[in-house]
Image: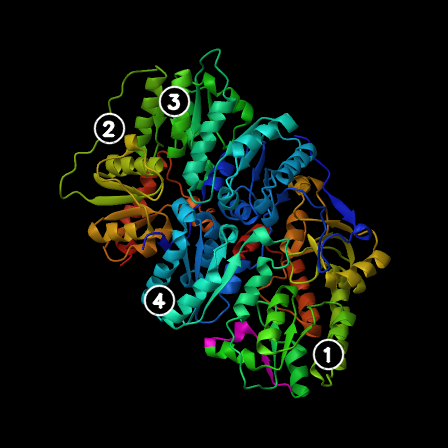
Amino acid sequence: MKGLYKVLPPFAPDYSGVCSVLFELGGLVIVHDAGGCTGNVTGYDEPRWYGNSSATFSSELREIEAVVGDDEKFLDRIEEAAKDLKRGFIAILGSPAPMVIGTDYRALAGVISQRTGLPSLAFDTNGIRYYDEGASMAFLELARQFVKPPALREQVVNIIGATPLDIGNERHIKKIASLLLEAGCKKVSCWGLGSTLEDIEEAGRAGLNIVVSRSGLAAARYLQREYKIPYLTGLPVGKASTCHFIKGVRFLFDYDYDLNGPSNTAHPGTNDPTALVIGEQVISNSIRDCLRMDFGVNRVTVASFFGLDKSLTEKGDIFLGHENDLTILVKKHHYDFIVGDPLYKELLSAGGHSFIEIPHVAVSSRLYWDNDLDYIGYEGTEFFKQAIKHKDERKIL
Amino acid sequence: MSKTKPFCLSVCELGSTGSADRRRVMPPNYLHYCPPSAGGWGIIRVGLLVPESVMLFVSPAGCGRHGAIAGIQLGFKKRLFFLHISELDIVTGQHLEKVFQAVAEILAEVRPRPKAMTICATCIDDLLGSDYDAIAKELESKHGIPVRACHMDPITMDGKTPPPFTVQQAVYDFIPRSDEKELAVNIIGSFAPFAQDSEFHEIMSAAGLEKVRHIADCSTLEEFYRMGRATHNILVKPGGRLAVRAMERKLGIPYCFAPVAYGLDTIDRNYRMLEKFLDIQLSTEEYREEARETADHYRHMIGSLTVAVGETANASPFEMARALIGYGFHVPYVFADMTLDIDQEHIEWLKCHAPDIKVFTNVHPTMVDFLQQKLTVDLAVGFDAGYFCSGAKTLPLSLDEQLYGYRGVASFFRQMLKVLENPQNHREQMYASGMVI
């Protein structure tokens, strides 16, 4: 039945997405919850939590406050914490319980701003939607609230959409940043991973935004509309795709116009090998490019339990609304290769495919977040080559 | 970003605000910090102690995530199912209808067919006033297996029926009343049975009490039901308080609270209390002597140590601090969020004998910058103390193993020595334990 999950764990919720984006930005982030939701974030959705002094808190909502609608206690707690802890902004996020009582976060954020003198952000999260929507809200809100109109344009690149929930290890972003510097960019600022709020304030100067997950799209589109900053979508995975990525960046920076080279447009034959990539859309698309361009696996379908943007969707790509949808999809179609989080394996019965594991923190949480796979950049080719070479040994049936 | 001094009280300042049996260390009305070391077994894992049972967790997707991941880590996920609630469900109440469909599907597919089921609801159903007990009754008659409702609703945490207590009540509520009685005791409150080497079984056996039962020793529902035949319940951890009270009402089994302790005098007092409760003579002197000798032996081997004690340890942190001071160690810090009624006498003792002890809470917002304090101790007992005293060697003293009585003390000392000689990576060990807030 729809909504019944017998195998997969619940995925990272929207409030985890918001918290992940704001984690490194020096704010006071408050999840309006009874404690358990914050425990989800800090224990299971935030690999950077251990040893860090990021100020993410629970409001400790209690039944009586919810029943009588006593927001004053919530406001007092925040005011008190703002006095004790000097942080640059305040963000309040929703959870299921305050959703039920119809909490107006925007109004509360307004009061908080007045009382503390700090900019306050409000996120109407509810723990029902998934992390990608929360992260998208947070990136967009950062763009709206903090990016200043640029006085000049520079060869700066913003990477938008990177959180550990999608990207996993921060090393992946460092690699993309070094490729961008290699391509001639003067500075790379990755929102939410290694950048400060000041970097985001200056983000309007950028000549290019790189969107590395669907959750960065809304902010990138906003910046394009407001400040005419173009954006590219995708990550460099594998040799051909990385060359193409660098050329694309150089083209947009006007270094050269030679965009010839391998293309990721596929013209599949019916006997070509087939693959299914299950995961976040932008990352999955980038893996699809690698499989096509480096290995000639032209018939690749992307499937996702998370949001799909129409402009990035190919014919045949599929949104998975429920656990059963994935089982049915794999029963219906034969795939030679399936790429995705290891937890999906249990849902994929017969089929003779080879499963290539790329953990997705938003799915499998801490189970694999210390795994350090090297698939971004030129090394992506070697990573998938090894995985494809061992197809026979890795068959799940 | 300026760093703030963490909130802290001297043990002498520990106040008396709050209900009689549970008092917060931190004053009310603060945001709560959730350190990486927060958590314990969690509601789901406790609920699944019922043998041959499965659990259906009914909630918005986010609520069950930590329990599910811990379930995969620790191997109980196969018995755990999630029914995700949508916004439309909340508005229409349709999710309550869907519970019936979900249960039918689970029982039709899972093999062997579950013999019992727990339905777990969350905060939002408390606010919506959903009646899961009525649903459980209906499911029970429809499917012919016992079904109980439990709640993972931290929104009630400050009330008289917080979820860590009510879940244990729900677990033991599966046991039917039995007219057949036998001379046996149940151990309630702990999630693991007493360690194999505990003298408890020998002492009881010598006094003619052969049967000591614990839920985690029961591999079948039938075996679990036999706990209903016992003549006495012994409560060893406060979390089982509602459960034993309910068992007294429903099953007619009286209870006695003899909490886990690490000081020899406190252990002795527990046994004397049990003598009265069970109305039998318990010969404990040789075990006490053995424990004293073992403690002296290890204390000599280990030498002087400074020890921080945390709340996540399988102990009352104040009793543990008192015991450690009694064995000759220096205890400068305790990490605790609550003080319970059973802590009071130990707190009073510490006020007289170790008034300089600083008490930190894990949850005060200022704890976010705590690692800047760089507190140094040799040993931390409990993951929380180990996290906040980051250079210390950590003895988790987890809830997965239940030390009890005199040999519990000996075991504690052995574990202490092992940790000092071969410390483990705190982060790895803590994440592997699958703790859930």
Colour pattern = rainbow
Q: Which is more N-terminal, label 4 or label 1?
A: 4
User: Is residue B274 depicted above or below B119 in this figure?
Assistant: below
User: Is residue A361 depicted above or below B258 in this figure?
Assistant: above
Residue B107: which quarter of the image? bottom left
Q: CA distance from mark 1 to mark 4?
A: 49 Å
Viewer-nearest of discs 1 and 4: 4
- Residue at the far right in the pictured view: B352
Determine the secondary structure under disc 1.
helix
Q: Amino acid at mark 1?
A: Tyr
Query: Chain for mark 2?
Result: A
Magenta stretch holds residue B214: yes
Magenta stretch holds residue A98: no
Q: CA distance from mark 1 to mark 3?
A: 74 Å
The residue beneath circle 4 is B107
Q: Which is more N-terminal, label 3 or label 2?
A: 3
The residue beneath circle 3 is A183
- Residue at the far left in the pictured view: A270
State the extent of the magenta-drawn residues as a range.
B209-221
Q: Amino acid at mark 4?
A: Leu
Q: CA distance from mark 4 to mark 2?
A: 53 Å
Task: Answer few, some or many: residues within 10 Å of disc 4's Cα (few below 14, many 20 plus, some between 14 and 19).
Answer: some
The residue beneath circle 1 is B287
Task: Answer few, some or many: residues within 10 Å of disc 3's Cα (few below 14, many 20 plus, some between 14 and 19).
Answer: some
The residue beneath circle 2 is A262
